């Protein structure tokens, strides 16, 4: 089974736990069978592997999320990197051309495309396998998965099938309706359109070349930023005549707001939290190293991270985006393929960061032109390389790096470092990468 997982989003509706680098699919609030917390992307990836251990899984995502995905899923997962956000049609085309040319997926093989972040159970992943099998048969150019509606939602588009069979030809599509219209659609057997579909590779390659002028993967990648922004639904799905839909009546939730996210939580709180008396329908997620005490609250969500603290009525939390747009957008916490960093203090001319590197990992060999850095090793052992000079480091060591010096740090055990950046202009863009010989 070839699966293309679409991973995007700016993370503003689940602020402060999500930001430009860490979207909702990376928030760890779900307990797995080992009792550890995992994110939606880890949950989806692991569940696909259970259904099909040999599945080829590729994530289509922006550059800013690549390190986070490597951190969660390891280096074996395929990643189709989008140079810019151009909506789902260009993302799916780029991902499929990547699968075909880079990962050698044949033109007769089926590809399943689905979001990376729904809240689902095991039957959903078995249904993905069924969807792939239907696409492989080639009885239709496109096979969609339609969700049996549980209420007249105004958030989703609707698929109107020709009949009530488990697999049916599609009659038409309807845009997101008001509640009354949604009720009318459901009475006619309509299904939610969850953006899940499958096709043969040859089909999408043909469509791609019809709608985009490119020769191969490298050419498409170089032109990507200038492609027209358009969804796959508008560009392909709603114009396709040979199309069918497979019904799915299992659990499927889009956890796009704090209200819906907390509905899926198996515990009232995560992190250093004390729940006092007389709380009702209260959930707390705390990523800070200070305790939170909640008392006498009703229908409230509290979320705390280095980016900020949210205290909100659950219903009102759905309207968070315009308020977050006005806040300072500096990312205070991010996970990378090598570990994570947390901003501790920001002042004019300086910034202090706590860096944690996983054992066996290292930073890129890089330099900064506009700032000096001072590294203080807090715990663990490793090696630093500064302008080619290697040094073994352990707790208590201090490394001074002047502007322009190439440098990296390599963790032999888990390594914690306090990094102080000093300069008149401190920017994430002030970074030049080098090959380490």
Image: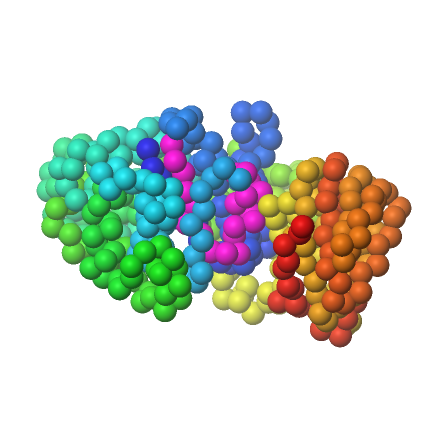
Is residue 21 rendered to the left or right of residue 169?
A: right
Is residue 110 rendered to the left or right of residue 270?
A: left
x, y (%) of residue 247? 23, 36
> Which residue extends farthest front?
437
Is residue 299 rendered to the left or right of residue 132?
A: right
The residue closer to the viewer here, 108 or 142, is 108
Q: Which stretch appears magenta? A: 55-74
x, y (%) of residue 160? 16, 46
User: What residue is at 52 percent from the left and 52 percent from the top?
Assistant: 65
Residue 59 sits inside the magenta stretch: yes
Residue 235 in which image quadrant? bottom left
x, y (%) of residue 83? 45, 60
User: What residue is at 64 percent from the left and 45 percent from the top?
Assistant: 338
The residue closer to the viewer here, 409 or 91, is 409
Residue 279 sits inside the magenta stretch: no
User: What residue is at 35 percent from the left and 44 percent from the top?
Assistant: 99
Residue 354, visible in the rendered structure: no
The N terminus appears in which quarter of the rendering?
Answer: top left
| Above/below status of 224 relative to 148 | below
Residue 90, visible in the rendered structure: yes
């Amino acid at each position: 089974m070839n699966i293309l997982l679409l991973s995007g989003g700016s993370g503003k509706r689940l602020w402060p736990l999500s930001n430009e680098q860490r979207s909702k699919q990376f928030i760890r609030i779900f307990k797995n069978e080992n009792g550890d917390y995992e994110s939606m992307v880890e949950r989806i990836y692991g569940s696909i592997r259970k259904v099909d251990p040999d599945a080829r899984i590729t994530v289509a995502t922006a550059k800013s999320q690549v390190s986070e995905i490597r951190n969660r899923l390891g280096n074996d997962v395929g990643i189709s990197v989008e140079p810019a956000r151009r909506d789902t049609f260009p993302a799916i085309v780029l991902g499929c051309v990547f699968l075909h040319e880079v990962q050698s997926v044949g033109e007769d093989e089926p590809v399943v495309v689905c979001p990376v972040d729904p809240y689902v159970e095991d039957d959903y992943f078995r249904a993905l396998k069924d969807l792939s099998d239907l696409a492989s048969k080639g009885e239709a150019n496109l096979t969609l998965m339609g969700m049996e509606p549980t209420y007249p939602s105004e958030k989703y588009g609707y698929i109107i099938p020709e009949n009530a069979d488990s697999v049916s030809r599609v009659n038409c599509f309807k845009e997101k309706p008001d509640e009354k219209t949604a009720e009318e659609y459901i009475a006619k057997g309509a299904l939610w359109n969850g953006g899940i579909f499958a096709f043969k590779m040859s089909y999408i390659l043909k469509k791609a070349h019809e709608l985009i002028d490119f020769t191969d993967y490298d050419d498409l990648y170089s032109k990507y930023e200038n492609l027209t922004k358009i969804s796959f639904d508008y560009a392909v799905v709603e114009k396709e005549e040979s199309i069918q839909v497979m019904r799915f009546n299992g659990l499927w939730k889009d956890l796009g707001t704090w209200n819906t996210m907390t509905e899926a939580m198996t515990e009232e709180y995560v992190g250093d939290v004390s729940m006092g008396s007389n709380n009702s329908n209260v959930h707390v997620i705390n990523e800070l190293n200070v305790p939170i005490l909640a008392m006498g609250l009703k229908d409230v969500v509290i979320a705390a991270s280095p980016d900020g603290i949210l205290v909100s009525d659950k219903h009102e939390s759905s309207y968070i985006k315009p308020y977050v747009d006005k806040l300072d957008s500096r990312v205070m916490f991010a996970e990378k393929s090598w570990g994570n960093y947390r901003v501790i203090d920001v002042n004019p001319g300086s910034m202090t960061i706590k860096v944690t590197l996983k054992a066996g990992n290292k930073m890129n060999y890089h330099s900064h032109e506009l700032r000096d850095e001072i590294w203080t090793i807090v715990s663990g052992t490793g090696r630093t390389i500064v302008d080619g000079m290697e040094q073994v480091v352990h707790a208590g060591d201090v490394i001074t790096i002047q502007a322009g010096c190439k440098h990296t740090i390599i963790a032999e055990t888990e390594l914690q470092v306090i990094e102080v950046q000093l300069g008149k202009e401190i920017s994430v863009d002030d970074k030049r990468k080098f090959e380490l010989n």
